[in-house]
Amino acid sequence: MKPFIRDIILEHKIEIMEEWQKEINKFRTDDSLQNITDTMYENTNREFVNKLILTVQTEDGGDHDELIQFAERLIQLGWPLNYITRGLQEFRKITIETLSETSDNYCKSIEFFQEIEDWIDGIVNLLVNQYSGSWENTVFLQKMALKELSAPLIPVFDNISVMPLIGTIDTERAKLIMENLLDGVIEHRSQVVLIDITGVPVVDTMVAHHIIQASEAVRLVGAKCILVGIRPEIAQTIVNLGIDLGKFPTKSTLKKGIESALELTKRQIVEIEQ
């Protein structure tokens, strides 16, 4: 930005800031901003416009660091991206309108408009990239955390393990289930594995196919598989779809499955009289 344009903007900064805050207050009724208190909204508006004015004061854009930190804080607090983008659009419009009304002829030229456009566009690209990068990183970390927790194989007795499944099973997750299942069988020396589908909302043909594949893989490494947690509606769906689960035992509850697993390993639960 040319030095004399920075001087004009700074000379009229109070007027620009006041007009901008009037316009940004019109967005207060947006649904995405309803969880934000009036005090926080006003304070954030004031800080936002101050950070924008700071970007004018240095030619090399060094003050963008403060603007980036401001955007990062908004991301952490859950502010919507359109607050940033609409705020910048209004700031662009108000800056051009305010300076166009001055006596300086240059502020009415195409070159002046282009200077303002380039300045604001640079900020838009910077903050949108910051938002996108932060969200992508957050989503990636959440995805990795869910993967680690989505298919654990838990030893419950000697040679008996349980894999509780929760949520929808897609192809990617089925691959993870298979890997965890086989690694866990070897690690825990499991003779019997119970796959608990109590938390799986829908069992369709694809889900059943993945479960059958998992049970076959368990059999190939020398263990037996029992499918537990079959609710009445799931049983009806399996029958209606014509899915054949006859190759391995099924039980309605985890308790019954554990009892069967104990029998397969020549053990049983007995009550001891006091």
Image: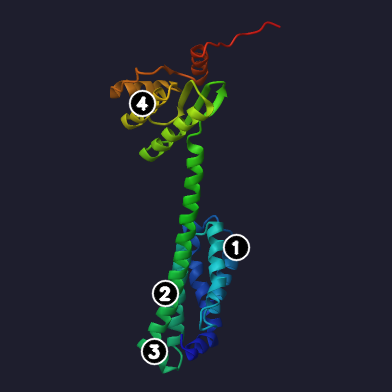
* Separation (CA) of disc 3 from disc 1: 36 Å
User: Which circle's residue, 1 or 4, is located before the other in the chain?
Assistant: 1
- Amino acid type at circle 2 is Asp
Q: Residue at x 46, y 81 (%)?
A: 95
Q: For the residues carrying marks 4 and 3, which lies nearer the camera in this image?
A: 4
- Residue indicated by mark 3: 108
Q: Which residue is drawn at the image coordinates 35% and 18% (left, top)?
A: 247
Nearer the N terminus, badge 3 or badge 1?
1
Q: Does dot 3 land on a helix, a strand or a loop?
A: helix
Residue matched to label 4: 212
User: Which residue is tagged 1?
Assistant: 40
| Residue lying farthest to the top in this orientation | 273
Query: Rounded to the nearest whole Å, what is the CA distance between mark 1 and mark 4?
Result: 54 Å
Query: What element does badge 2 sit on?
Result: helix
Depth order, front residue of 54/96: 54
Is 208 placed above or below 66 here? above
Residue 173: image x %, image y %?
A: 41, 38
Q: Is 4 positioned to the left or the right of 245 in the image?
A: right
Corner quadrant of residue 210: top left
Q: Is residue 7 visible?
A: yes
Q: Which residue is mark 2?
A: 121
Q: Amino acid at mark 1?
A: Met
Looking at the picture, how far across and down is residue 180, in whole percent?
A: 46, 34
Density class for disc 3 (Cα within 10 Å; few <14, some 14-19, many ≥20) is some
